[in-house]
Structures are given as C-alpha cells and as structure tokens.
Amino acid sequence: MSTTNPPTMRDLIDRVDAVRNTLSDAARQGAMEKLAKRGRLSARERIARLVDPGSFSEVGGLVTAEDDGIGADNFPVRTASPADGVVTGTGLVDGRPVVVFSQDFSVHGGSIGRLGSAKIQRALQVAITRGLPLVMILDGGGHRIQDGQDARHFANANATFHNFARASGWVPMVALMLGAGFAGPTNYAGMADLVVMVRGLSTMGIAGPALVKAATGEEVDAMELGGAEVQVDRQGIADLGVDSEDEAFAAARRFLGYLPGNARAPQQVVDEPRPLAQLPDSILDLVPVSTRKAYDVRKVLRELADVGSYFELKPTFAGNMITALARLGGRPVGFIANQPLRLGGMINSDACDKGAHFIALCDAFGLPIVSFVDVPGFSIGSSAERTSLGRRSAKLVFEWGHASVPRVSVVLRKGYGLGYFAMCGGRSFSADACFAWPSAEICAMSIEGAIDVAFRKQYEAAADPAARRQQMIDETRTRIGALRAAEGFGIDDIIDPRDTRRRLAEILDSAQPRRPHDHPPKFRSITPI
C-alpha cells in the first residue's frame, strides 16, 4: 500500500503553471534574442501591441508538437515545438472582442505544423460561431515541409479555406504581414478584408525565392519577388504599406473601428448633432468648372467627411479610383470616387478590381456607399484590351447590382458613357438619391469624340471645317449640363456643393439599412473573372 500522499489541487495547479512557464517567452531567452537581433517582436509581444492592455486570453498555449517527419529519426532527442508555432486567443480592440492568431517565427521559421493548423482552424471556428472579427498576424512559412511530405497526414487536408470562405462577409478579417509571408500566409491574406504590409520587412507571394529557384531555376530577391513595392503599389494585393509594425497595428484598429463585429451586429455610429452645418465657401473652389483642369478629389472627400475620419484603402494602387472609409454625420460610410489627377479619372482594369472589392466590403458589413463621379469613361485601345477590361469592368457593375446597402451618387463634373453607369450615376442602380453639382456634364461620350465620330463628314464639308467643328462642339456642350439632366429627371436635384454634407446625411438617416432582395429565384450569380 502506497504511503505517498496524493497531489492536492494546488499541486496540480503548480504543475500546470510550471509547464506553462517553460513554454513562455521568458523561458526561451535564446529564441527571443535571435528575434531581437532581427528587429522583430515575438508573437505574444505583437498581440500585446494590438489588443487592449491585459485583455488577451490565450487558447492552446500548452500545445507542443514533436518532430516526427523527415529527418526526425536522426535526432536522439526530439525537439519540442512551443505552441506549435502559432499563438491564438481572444482579446479586446478598443473595448470590442476579437479573435487573433500570431505566427511565431522563432518556432521552425513560423511554418504551420499539424497542431498549429488545428489552432488556426479553431480560431476561425470561434470567430464564425461567436461572430467576432479575426486578426491574423503573419510572419512565417506555409505548411511545415517536414510534416507535409507524408500522405498519412497531408491527404486529409483540412477545412481551413472552407471556413475562410464561410467567414468572408460574416466577420471582418484583417491580415498583418509582419515578415516572411510566402505560401500559406499569402493564402490566408487573400481571404482578408484588409491586408497591411511593412515596407522593407514584409513579403507576400505564392512561393518564396528558395522554392521558386528549386522549381523553375529562377533566382530572385524576396523583396523583388513579393515586397510591399510589388504587392501594395503595383499589384494591389495588399491594401496598405506602412513604415512600422506599430503603424500596422494602428491601421488594424482603425479599420475595425468602422465596421460592426459581424454582418448582423449594430453599426459603429457616433453622435453627431443634426442638421449638419453648411460647408465653408472654400469647397466651391475645389472642383474647377473647366473639364481640362485636374484637381485632387481627396480634398473634396476630406471636406465632406467628419473631421479626422477619412481612411483611404489602397491609396498607392489604381490611383485613378479612390476608395475610403469615413464617417458622415457620425455614420460609417464608404466613399468611392474618380480621381482626375490620375488618367483624368478614367476607369481601367485595376480601378475596376479595386472598386468592385470595395463595394463588396461595404455591402457585406452594411456601410452605405457614396459615389463621387467625375469620369471620362473607360480606358480604350489595345493595351486596355490586353488587361481583360471587358471582363474586369463587369465586376464593377456586378457588385453594384448585388449591393443591398443605401447608395447615393454625386456627379461632381464629368459623367460620361459606361463610366457613368459604373459609378452608379443616375437611375443605373436605383440609388437612394442621385445628385449633381452645378459643374456636372452628363453624356454618352466626350463631346469632341462624339463630334468626330458622328459628324466628321458634315464639318469637313463646311467652308471652314475647324470653325464648324468647334461650333458643333459648343452647341453640344449646351445640352449636357446639370440643368439639362435635372429637366429630364435623370437626377433628383442639383445641389449647392456647400450643402452636400447635409443632403447626404439626410438621405442616409432616412434610408432603410438594407433594400429588399429583388433578384429572381436563382441559387447564385456567376462572378465575372
């Protein structure tokens, strides 16, 4: 008969705490020093920078995995994998609950092992079930090669991407790329609503330089292959390029501040007295009446938004289309606008992709959309056709046709051709209100182009062809102005620019948050490529 006293509850608690301590950052000084030499924070330190102080509750902190893949038999002692390279849990961001997971680069380079993958799936499950935003802090490789090269494990696959698809449009998802992000992290980020990269630090791509060289023989630098200059500025795969990790955390917090916790949760409205004050006379000088003069539409948007609330997405990609979150009278809204400073505001393929994704984001989370129109039309020519513009332009109008949130259009100046439709002009997509400033011009195509296409023979037959051509241009211009549009009831009203904030707020205050579904009884629409 044993005389050993059975452990008490306090003894058991102490044992668990002792194991937990061996897996903490403090117990792994060598690994933490290596991170510090690379100028990186640990996975837990990053989470602490993101969430409200003291609010993080870790899930799966006691997980360890042992190396049992390729090469494991060569080691007499198997190496533990603390938390299996990913820290998961829940916390608060500005007092609101979120789910977060953070890759630990100090564990097998942040690669995703079997238990680490299970933890990520658990984080997704919690986000979906509880209806909480998901923040992913990504710094590491994709599937751990040592684990994955065994069909016994890999053939099962897992439900990660099925659950990402389920979460999309239900809860906001943010991906912060804070280091190496090739393969798996890029696949995760591709499902996110906001992707932030740190310039000079972050990379993204389907495969990193080593795998590229092994598969194709191509030698390429990581930054050249997938740095922020490529993925933020040129490709638009990521939304923002920032200069530090703290700026990335701040961007995540700000982005989530505009959105509800999930698609059925209340909007994050703040009090703003009504009626809104008239804007100052200075707004009258922001948009030149002459269509030959460029201007920065962002100055208009900032003037219309509540003070300090303008938050632009993809500011360095497809600059001819502006997409921004803002508040209008305390209400979160989406602003989409043509930018005359770039390509005269003409819509090309990249602008279509950017605008379509933004409309889908706003619609998913119930943000009304205000469209500011100054568009000369779509890009044309062989170079435009090589970008599949015919298909990609369809994505933009497709999203307008499926959106159920309130929408308002304001024609600032040009509203030409299919571009006018694609910016929700007039009655094209049943806007809750369609306004124009007195400077608006609305017609099927540029005046000069219309005259040259339809009336060239007439003016060339005149005694003075150039004078006759100009006369026809001047006559046509008298028929495309804002008053003419209002006379035919193509727009609801011509508004004084100084009254724009007030009129927009009035419409959005009275509009239903969702319009009734008016599509035929189909199972789904087919998204244009």
Image (cartoon, rainbow, N blue to C red):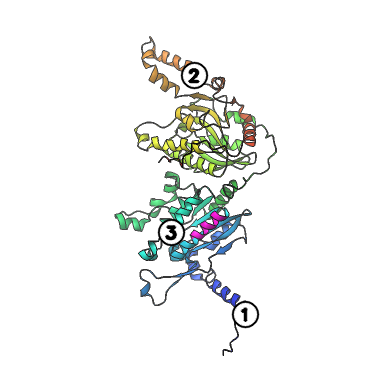
Q: Which of marks 3 and 2 is in front?
A: 3
Residue bearing the label numbered 2: 477
Query: What crowding class fits label 3: few (fewer than 14 Cα within 10 Å), some (14-19), or many (20 or more)?
Result: few
Query: Is residue 222 among the parts visible in the rendering?
Result: yes
Q: Which mark is residue 517?
A: none
CA separation in Å, label 1 and label 2: 90 Å
**In the rendered structure, does residue 128 fall within the stretch colored magenta?**
yes
CA separation in Å, label 1 and label 3: 40 Å
CA separation in Å, label 3 and label 2: 61 Å
- Please identify the quadrant where the N terminus is shown: bottom right
Q: Which of marks 1 and 2 is in front?
A: 1
Residue bearing the label numbered 1: 8
Residue 526 placement (x, y as % from top left): 43, 40
Numbered disc 2: secondary structure: helix
* Mark sitting earlier along the chain (1/3): 1
At horizontal 57% and vertical 24% (from top left) the residue drawn is 438
Q: Give the range drawn in magenta.
A: 120-129
* Mark sitting earlier along the chain (3/2): 3
Q: What residue type is labelled 2?
A: Arg
